[in-house]
Amino acid sequence: MTGAEIVVTRNTATRPDLADGADPVTTEIIRQGLNAAAEHMKLALIRTSFSPIIYEALDFAVALYDADMCMLAQAPTLPAFMGTLGFCVREAVTAVGGAGTLRPGDVVLYNDPYGTGSHPQDAAMVVPIFVDDDLVAYSVIKAHWLDIGGKDPYCTDTVDVFQEGTIFPGVKLYDGGERVDGIYRMILANSRLPEAVIGDIDAMVAGARSGGEALARIVRRYGLDVFRSCVARMYDHGETLIRSWFTRLPDGTYREESVIDWDGVVEEPVPFSLEVHVEGSTVRVDYTGAPDQRSGPINCPLPSTVAASRLAIAYLAGAGEAPNEGHFRALEVVTRPGSLFHPVSPAPCFMYGIPSDHAIELILRALAKALPEAVPAASGGDINALVWWGNREATGAPWADGAPHPVGQGATAEADGGNALMYLSESATRFTPAEIWEVRNPWRIEQCALAVDSGGPGRQRGGLGLDLSFRMLEDCYLTSALARTRLLPWGLSGGEPGRSNGLTIEYPDGTTSQYDLRTRVPVPKGAVVHLRTGSGGGYGDPAARRPDAVRADLIDGYITAEHAERWYGHALGQLSARLFPGTAAST
């Protein structure tokens, strides 16, 4: 493979000279101030948005970037988005003519999938931040709009990007503080839910502006030179932290393979592989072994491929610290344009999250070969997104809602996997309360329970998935965006796999149908939709599980006696001896 056939994405914005002489106390004050400014953006968006997908599910990300478009701070929001925001800023600013064309009061709208890494519904608002006459930074919010003119509100079967929604390839929504009404009216005209979408857009603008004002106050307080010097030191600290963890890994190449169920259009499995190269304190994730871009919408644009790689690395090496651009200097990502992980127009990419979530799991599995005690077994591995829409029976008014759903997490060398938590790429989002769902939508929640016996057996047990049932009170449509319905979440070091994801619709006449990737499924009044989210794989030999852990699982109802007898028979004998001393089991 020649160099012209690959793209290497790395962080090259290193300016160590700026960090010389930066006061460490001032640096920490500025770092925490930037984190607080990002959190302020987040809260402003939550408090003013119209759609539950934003204010309840938190399907958005917010961040601040310096004038070189390096990440200063981000609030804990949707992780899969956060690694893409630098691309959003860069592409949006380039599209309007570069930084020199920007002025105070501008707001740039950008939702081209190949630059955002997402489907068109995930739109970015970029606000340049000026102090006096200097462009010092950018604030950016990327959030999911309920509808922006795709062939359906949520699609699993698109064949090109033009079916997926209206694209705004970097246009000023506000120019010098004045709203551009032509763009605003285009948004209204291309949405089935214009009131909600416009309300969310106004909230995004307000949130991004509030973050800009908070950052400007920090710069004014300390001066631009001190600010830039402390930011450079902040980046250096992040790089040192990550590289110190990487040095624990033995040098080498670690390769893994996986299979995606199908691409939503062609009914066949989609195998792919990736490699993780470790050399000293640098890690390179190589996706050039991926197949060509697919005819269905599972293609993952470059920004989300990079984001998945960063997320996996930060999960292992980040020490729970709020990240900045420095944390990613040690990571390189290699892709091949025209492939599954670097598609080019007009490849459809609505379901980009499926391969990116697969990639996260594979990176972790690859690094388990290098440092097994630091890596968990596989989780349910998918966000299990469901999107619903229709017209209300009494009024005819359009409605729509959608949400991710929790999965069981993989066990580690030291602990059982977490039960029913949002997948890693969505880990800062929230599971919508049943009360909110039932008030806003025409359904009743008939079951919301941990799935007994679902966790992968092991010395440490995998986390349990979720069983969730919706009874429809009115006719509607459903898009099921489930992946990993055929691939069992793997265990590690002798642990057993967990269960896969699945969805069944039980119709009023008693018939049932199973779905994975399906768009616009009619769901009649009286039907029940049963969602079964995947669980985590186990870690270690089940025969080594402690008897008291098995007893606790039985008491808590996480496992049945039959499950315990099958996988933990050794523990049952010891438990019987404790409960009934003097019996044969005690000898």
Image (cartoon, rainbow, N blue to C red):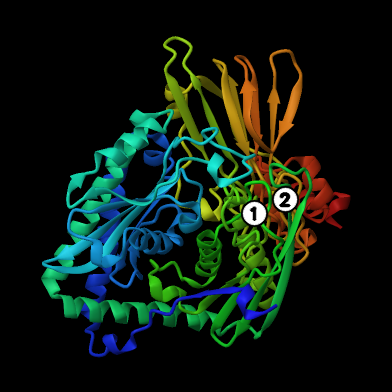
Residue 463 lies, with reference to residue 394, above or below; the image says below
Circles 1 and 2, Cβ within 8 Å, touching? The answer is: yes
Q: Which of 577/549 is in front?
A: 549
**Residue shown at 65%/59% (left/top)?**
340
Residue 514: numbered disc? none
Q: Where is residue 91 in the image (x, y as percent from the top left)?
A: 40, 61
Left or right placement of residue 457 versus residue 174 in this view? right
Secondary structure beneath dot 2 equals loop
Amino acid type, residue under disc 2 in the picture: Gly
Name the residue nearer the viewer: 149 or 257.
149
Q: Position of residue 555 (x, y in %)?
A: 65, 42
The secondary structure type at the circle numbered 1 is loop
Q: In this view, does 227 lie to the left or right of 58?
A: left
Q: Residue 379 carries which label?
A: 1
- Residue 288 vs 381, above or below: the answer is below
**Which residue is disc 2 drawn over?**
498
Q: How far across and how far down the image is residue 321, in percent?
A: 40, 68
The type of residue carrying mark 1 is: Ser
The quadrant of the picture occupied by the C terminus is bottom right
Density class for disc 2 (Cα within 10 Å; few <14, some 14-19, many ≥20) is many
The mark that comes first in sequence, 1 or 2, is: 1
Instruction: Please determine whether, in this image, residue 183 is positioned above or below residue 526.
Output: below
